[in-house]
């Protein structure tokens, strides 16, 4: 079966634990205002057979060690869940583990469940904490990500939750309390990480001729981000 690949970043030290090979799949149903990868939104990309992908990533196996492996990212990787599900047995044969970096904003199909079940863990972006803000800033409903999170809870899949913090939108303790209230219902959540908004993708909007809704927004101040991260860490510890 073919998947559509936007790009592959070998030996990325981000997007999951250990040394990883990030496979960015094309297409995304969301339109987050802070997106720094608008070039991944459209379906398309390089058609690639599962066997060819696994052959390619298997070259990096010696670098993965105990904790590394593949990260399926995007775009939204799970809109190509049938492709990922078809690759799972091939990766297993090579003893390569993978994690999913997803918004969870996809219907819970059997292929999505298979992709989740085969993953060693999930990085789930909780973009906004309620229907109104989710709609406003992603142009989609929070219902699908919440069902996705409920599925992770049901099958006991470890989940690292991530939220992009944007100056002037959700960079306050009050906002974080709203996110934490959602997450308090899920014991599968192993960690809650805040990521700072940055402007590194601005040139892509310009190149694509797409309006950038945050063109006048500055990057998140790292010091303020640390303060907010400490705030959620303390709150999470107090509730455990
Ligand atoms: S889910 Fe990711 S790729 Fe899709 S619009 Fe949001 S930030 Fe961009």
Image: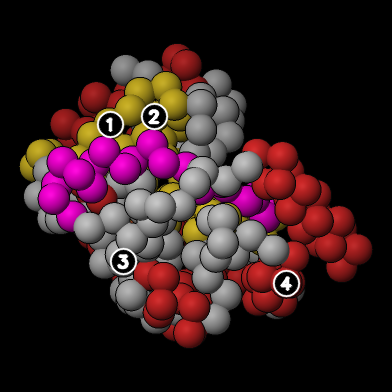
The residue at which mark 4 appears reads as: 174
Picture coordinates of residue 85 (x, y %)?
A: 29, 55
Label number found at residue 30: 3
- Tell me the SS state at disc 1: strand
Q: Of the residues tagged 4 and 3, which is closer to the observer?
A: 4
Picture coordinates of residue 223 (x, y %)?
A: 72, 40
Mark 3 in CB contact with mark 1 (< 8 angstroms): no
- Tell me the SS state at disc 4: helix
Pick whichever of labels 2 and 4 is earlier in the sequence.
2
Pick whichever of labels 3 and 2 is earlier in the sequence.
2
Q: Residue furthest front?
A: 216
Residue at image coords 38%, 56%: 214
Mark 1 in CB contact with mark 4 (< 8 angstroms): no
- Crowding at dot 1, Cα within 10 Å, few <14 / some 14-19 / many 20+, comes out as some
Can the viewer see residue 86 in this picture?
no
Label number found at residue 8: 1
- Tell me the SS state at disc 3: loop
Residue at image coords 24%, 24%: 56
Measure the C-alpha gap from mark 2 to mark 4: 36 Å
Measure the C-alpha gap from mark 1 to mark 2: 7 Å
Pick whichever of labels 3 and 1 is earlier in the sequence.
1
Q: Work out whether residue 58 or residue 225 is closer to the camera in this orientation and state it.
A: 225
Pick whichever of labels 1 and 4 is earlier in the sequence.
1
User: Under 8 Å from ligand 1: the CB of mark 2?
Assistant: no
Label number found at residue 121: none
Mark 3 in CB contact with mark 2 (< 8 angstroms): no
The residue at which mark 2 appears reads as: 21
Q: Please provide the residue range marked out in magenta.
A: 191-210
């Amino acid at each position: 079966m073919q998947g559509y690949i936007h790009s592959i970043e070998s030996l990325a030290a981000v997007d999951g634990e250990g040394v990883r090979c990030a496979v960015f799949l094309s297409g995304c149903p969301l339109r987050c205002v802070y997106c720094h990868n608008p070039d991944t939104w459209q379906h398309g990309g390089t058609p690639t057979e599962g066997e060819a992908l696994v052959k390619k990533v298997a070259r990096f196996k010696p670098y993965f060690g105990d904790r590394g492996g593949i990260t399926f990212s995007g775009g939204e990787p799970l809109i190509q869940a049938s492709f990922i599900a078809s690759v799972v047995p091939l990766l297993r044969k090579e003893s390569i583990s993978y994690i999913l970096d997803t918004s969870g904003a996809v219907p819970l199909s059997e292929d999505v469940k298979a992709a989740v079940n085969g993953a060693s863990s999930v990085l789930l972006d909780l973009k906004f904490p309620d229907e109104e803000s989710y709609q406003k800033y992603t142009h989609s409903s929070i219902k699908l990500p919440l069902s996705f999170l409920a599925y992770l809870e049901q099958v006991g899949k470890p989940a690292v939750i991530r939220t992009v913090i944007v100056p002037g939108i959700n960079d306050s303790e009050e906002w974080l309390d709203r996110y934490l209230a959602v997450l308090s219902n899920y014991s599968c959540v192993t960690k809650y990480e805040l990521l700072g908004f940055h402007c590194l993708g601005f040139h892509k909007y310009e190149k694509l001729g797409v309006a950038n809704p945050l063109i006048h927004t500055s990057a998140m101040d790292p010091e303020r981000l640390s303060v907010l991260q400490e705030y959620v860490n303390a709150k999470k510890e107090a509730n455990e």
